Image: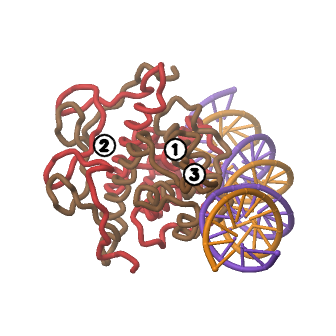
Chain colours: A red, B brown, C purple, D orange
Amino acid sequence: MQRTRFGEMACSIARTTDVIGEPWSPLVLRDVFAGVHRFDQIQADLGISRKVLTERLNHLVEQGVLERRAYDGRPRFEYHLTDKGTELVDLLMVMTRWGDRWLAGEAGPPVLYRHHACGEISGVDLRCARCGEPMHARDVDLLPGPGSAG
Amino acid sequence: MQRTRFGEMACSIARTTDVIGEPWSPLVLRDVFAGVHRFDQIQADLGISRKVLTERLNHLVEQGVLERRAYDGRPRFEYHLTDKGTELVDLLMVMTRWGDRWLAGEAGPPVLYRHHACGEISGVDLRCARCGEPMHARDVDLLPGPGSAG
DNA sequence: GGTTTAAGTTCCCTTAGGGAACCCAGTTTG
DNA sequence: CAAACTGGGTTCCCTAAGGGAACTTAAACC
């Protein structure tokens, strides 16, 4: 999709949308993160059209989020997260947290995260990278940065 | 677009995608967060088609992320974040951080966040909501939760 | 009474998603 | 050694969604 190319805009949100914002892309990334690495497995797990899956995987590889890796020494491939892709999983974790809070309903969260450091079932919280205090929408002012268009 | 309805899936990432995953939606939310509240302003700022903007705003209002508020006591409306929408801005802040790190290039970040608590220009970092230690892709195990399909 | 402004709505055109069928190289099976 | 199987796609057609420009409506302003 995406008739408009968001990647050209002077906005990190738009640019990130350009990488991961197409339909299915977050779910493809989720699958790879969760250990589903092969084309047919992802296709079956998501119920996505093979055509669209091909397009999404190619795009994510081009963007450096996924890596296409041969296995078995023959034309068989697995998709794995690069460092860039691994950091993008932060986004999925925040989506999970928000979806768990606002959309999960009675049944509760479909998936739980266990944190290695404390061993507890938990979710992510946003903190200021500098002072460590909570950092959410109401805790910040927006200022034009060096890469702004104006 | 979204031919497939992600909202029905037993996955908080899919459900969140259903709310905010359509093209332009994150940018509409960004504008409202940044203080651009009116139809024509958003339309001009983004260069989005009026038709699509109408659809996106309606969807975000239906989902409880935005609130449509009359002003001037006549048929004029402004869009504002609800609590649900304000929490969704967490997602934008993580997108900003990732885009700043991986896509901003030489020019640097287009927009900066100043954190009220410390007064510094900063970005968000993900921490465990329970123990406060860093929490990223490599720091968690995934387990089926109460709302899982199986 | 004519113009302006805000907020949509309608129409047409193009393009991207959905789905099923097909393809091809390498591998196992009979 | 041929037939069937497997993984990873590609091709085709159909439909629905995005883009853009023009039109509409209602209230206020001049």
Residue type for callout 2: Ala
Q: Residue B85 placed where, x, y %?
A: 44, 44
Is residue A61 visible from the viewing direction of this image? Answer: no
Vertical order, A74 against A2 (above or below):
above
Residue at figure coordinates x 44%, y 58% from the top left: B30
Q: CA distance from mark 1 to mark 3?
A: 7 Å
**Amino acid type, label 1:** Thr
Q: Residues within 10 Å of mark 1 (few under 14, many from 20)?
A: many
Q: Earlier in the sequence, mark 2 or mark 3?
A: 3
Asked where in the image residue C3 lies, by quadrant, the reply is: bottom right
For this view, does C22 lie left or right of residue A134? right
* Residue D13 placement (x, y as % from top left): 86, 54
Protein chain holding label 1: B
Which of pointers 2 and 1 indicates the residue nearer the eye?
1
Q: CA distance from mark 2 to mark 3?
A: 25 Å
Q: Please report, as a chain letter, where disc 2 is located.
A: B
Identify which residue is drawn at 28% across, 60% down: A141
Q: Which residue is mark 1?
A: B17
Q: Check the residue under mark 3 and report the chain it is in.
A: B
Q: Answer above or below: position of B49 versus C2.
A: above
Q: Which residue is mark 3?
A: B22
- Residue B5 x %, y %: 63, 39
Q: For the residue marked with disc 3, what is the amino acid?
A: Glu
Q: Residues within 10 Å of mark 3 (few under 14, many from 20)?
A: some
